[in-house]
């Protein structure tokens, strides 16, 4: 564990918590440990896959793939950023030719945002790389650990429901 990791763990109260090193953690430690593990795993996946786009741009591509067409204001709301921030993100994605804007038939002042074919390909590539990264990490686990993760998936999926 690095000094930074130790400092982070100590600040959250989990470094020397009950059962430290034995796996016997109290419910009070669970949120902190889960946050730390999920955050680190997310960073590792981004690093391992050689993330070509910043996280917010990648998230916008994924949202557009799943829910396009969207107006800028709706996209900003879904990504929990301000419209000016979303405008900058969309400008960068537009410059990279990853999206297409079309006039909104219900409001001539607005545009609907869709992924371009290059945008669809970019998000497919990112997802494939990240899935491969996770698969490599899963291969390092023993069968019991993989089974435990599989058993935990419904609970983890429930945590991300809105």
Image: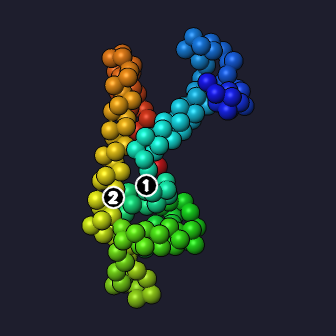
In the image, 25 versus 124, the foreground residue is 124
Percent x, y for residue 8? 68, 32
- The correct choice, above or below, for 16 with respect to 135 in the image is above
Q: Residue furthest bottom?
A: 108
Figure disc tally? 2
Percent x, y for residue 124? 30, 53
Query: Residue at coordinates 53% horizontally, 36% vertically from top-left?
Result: 40
Image coloring type: rainbow
Residue of label 2: 122
- The correct choice, above or below, for 92 with respect to 10 in the image is below
Is residue 110 found left or right of 150 in the rendered image?
Answer: right
Query: Residue at coordinates 33% horizontally, 58% vertically from top-left?
Result: 122
Query: Residue at coordinates 38% horizontally, 57% vertically from top-left?
Result: 62
Query: Residue at coordinates 44% horizontally, 50% vertically from top-left?
Result: 51
Q: Quadrant of the N terminus?
A: top right
**Callout 1: helix, strand or loop?**
loop
Q: Which circle marks residue 52 in the picture?
A: 1
- The correct choice, above or below, for 92 with respect to 36 in the image is below
**Residue 108's image quarter?**
bottom left
Dot 1 or dot 2: first in sequence order is 1
**Callout 2: helix, strand or loop?**
helix
Mark 1 or 2: in front is 1
Q: Residues within 10 Å of mark 2 (few under 14, many from 20)?
A: some
The reply to whether callout 1 and callout 2 are in contact (CB within 8 Å) is yes
- Evaluate whether residue 100 shows in this view: yes
- The correct choice, above or below, for 86 with respect to 135 in the image is below
Q: Which circle marks residue 18 in the picture?
A: none
State how far apart marks 1 and 2 are (Cα).
Answer: 9 Å
């Amino acid at each position: 564990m690095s000094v930074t990791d130790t400092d982070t763990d100590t600040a959250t109260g989990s470094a020397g918590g009950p059962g430290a090193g034995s796996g016997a953690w109290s419910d009070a430690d669970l949120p902190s440990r889960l946050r730390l593990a999920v955050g680190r795993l997310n960073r590792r996946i981004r690093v391992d896959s050689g993330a070509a786009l910043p996280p917010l741009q990648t998230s916008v591509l994924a949202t557009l793939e799943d829910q396009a067409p969207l107006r800028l204001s709706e996209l900003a709301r879904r990504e929990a950023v301000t419209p000016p921030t979303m405008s900058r993100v969309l400008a960068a994605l537009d410059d990279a030719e990853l999206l297409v804007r079309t006039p909104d038939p219900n409001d001539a002042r607005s545009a609907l945002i869709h992924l371009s074919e290059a945008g669809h390909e970019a998000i497919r590539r990112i997802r494939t790389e990240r899935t491969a990264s996770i698969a490599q990490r899963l291969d390092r686990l023993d069968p019991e650990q993989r089974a435990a993760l599989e058993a935990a998936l419904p609970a983890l999926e429930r945590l991300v429901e809105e």
